[in-house]
């Protein structure tokens, strides 16, 4: 018998294609669950730190996601902006895979970025 992973079960890994993002809500908090170009799954705050725009609607390239509103890009591993106009990071959350189940723990912000309540 295995221990249940930390966080919330948010989707099946097969629900997310390579270079795709899925917007989910944990409670009322929007999270983008993203599969990068290498097939790795990440979870970040879904709202751009520059404007109130959903990042999950943006393009995924390499290990970054681009905000469709103004072109800011964020590193999926660190949450750091890679391109202006954003200069504040977005939160990056712990992701656990249990088989094909994807768990996201919004209480575990791995990059220390502030988590805004919406």
Image (cartoon, helix red, strand yellow):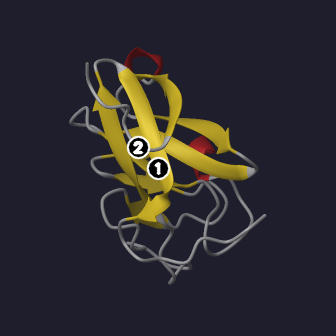
User: Whole-percent x and y of residue 84?
Assistant: 50, 78
Give the quadrant of the C terminus.
Answer: bottom right
Q: Which disc is residue 63 wearing?
A: none
Which numbered disc flags the more N-terminal residue, 2 or 1? 2
Q: Position of residue 93 (x, y in %)?
A: 43, 56
Q: Nearer the viewer, residue 67 or 79?
A: 79
The residue at the point 51 percent across, 82 percent down is 88
Q: Pick the quarter of the image with the N terminus.
A: top left
**Residue 90 in sight:** yes
Neighbour tally class for label 1: few under 14, some 14-19, many 20 plus, Cα within 10 Å:
many
Front residue (pair 2, 76): 2
* 16 or 9, nearer to the observer: 9
Residue 71 vertical position relative to residue 24 in the rendered view, above or below: below
**Which residue is the site of mark 2?**
6
Residue 105 shows which numbered tag?
Answer: 1
Q: Nearer the viewer, mark 2 or mark 1?
A: 2
Residue located 63% across and 38% down the image: 24
Camera sees residue 58: no
Do the residues bearing badges 2 and 1 touch, measured as CB atoms within 8 Å?
A: yes
């Amino acid at each position: 018998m295995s221990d249940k992973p930390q966080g919330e079960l948010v989707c099946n890994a097969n629900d997310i294609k390579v270079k795709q993002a899925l917007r989910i809500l944990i409670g009322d908090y929007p999270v983008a669950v993203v599969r990068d170009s290498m097939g790795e799954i990440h979870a970040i705050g879904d709202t751009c730190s520059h404007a109130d725009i959903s990042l999950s609607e943006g393009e995924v390239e390499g290990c970054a996601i681009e905000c469709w509103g103004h072109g800011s890009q964020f590193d999926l591993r660190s949450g750091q902006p890679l391109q202006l106009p954003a200069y504040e990071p977005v939160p990056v959350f712990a992701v656990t895979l249990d088989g094909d189940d994807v768990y996201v723990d919004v209480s575990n912000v791995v990059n220390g970025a502030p988590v805004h309540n919406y």
